[in-house]
Amino acid sequence: IAEKPAEQAPAAEEIMFDKAEQAQQKENEKNDLLENIKQLEKELKEESNPKKNNIKEALEKARERLKAFEQMAGEANGNGDAH
């Protein structure tokens, strides 16, 4: 027995909602990373030399996470690089 289109609609709506929610979460993560990078760059300009190395390391890690995040987002959208 085939399902009626009306019975399939709630499932489709749930999938759309889940996709939208996932996209929002990813956008929030990206914005958090960007804000973190801005804050670290600001601190790098303000802090004394002993802390600069720690800030540089944290900044480098945050940039790497952002790059990985953007690559994953690009692949999820079908925009990944073919190597």
Image: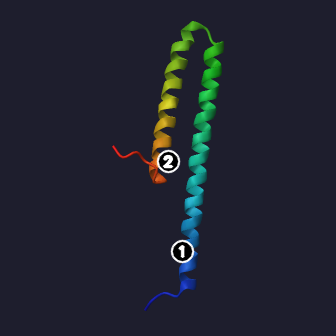
Q: Position of residue 22 (x, y in %)?
A: 55, 55
* Residue under pointer 1: 11
In the orientation shown, which residue stands out farthest toward the left? Answer: 83
Compare marks 1 and 2 and give the one earlier in the sequence: 1
Tell which tag, 1 or 2, sits nearer the viewer. Answer: 2
Kindly identify the residue that appears in the image at 58 percent across and 41 percent down.
30
Query: Which quadrant does the C terminus fall into?
Result: top left
Q: Quadrant of residue 32?
A: top right
* Rendered residue at 44%/49% (across/down): 75
Q: Judge by depth and name the residue closer to the eye, 53 or 80.
A: 80
What distance separates the C-alpha of mark 1 from that of mark 2? 24 Å
Label 1 Cα crowd, 10 Å radius (few <14 / some 14-19 / many 20+) = few
Name the residue at 55% across, 13% down.
52
- Labelled disc at residue 40: none
Residue 82 in the image, given as x and y percentages of width and height: 36, 46
In the rendered view, tell whether residue 71 sits above or below residue 62. Answer: below
Q: Secondary structure at mark 2?
A: helix
Mark 1 residue type:
Ala
Which amino acid is tagged 2?
A: Ala
Q: Report the colour scheme.
A: rainbow
**Residue shown at 59% from the left, 29% from the top:** 37
The residue that disc 2 covers is: 73
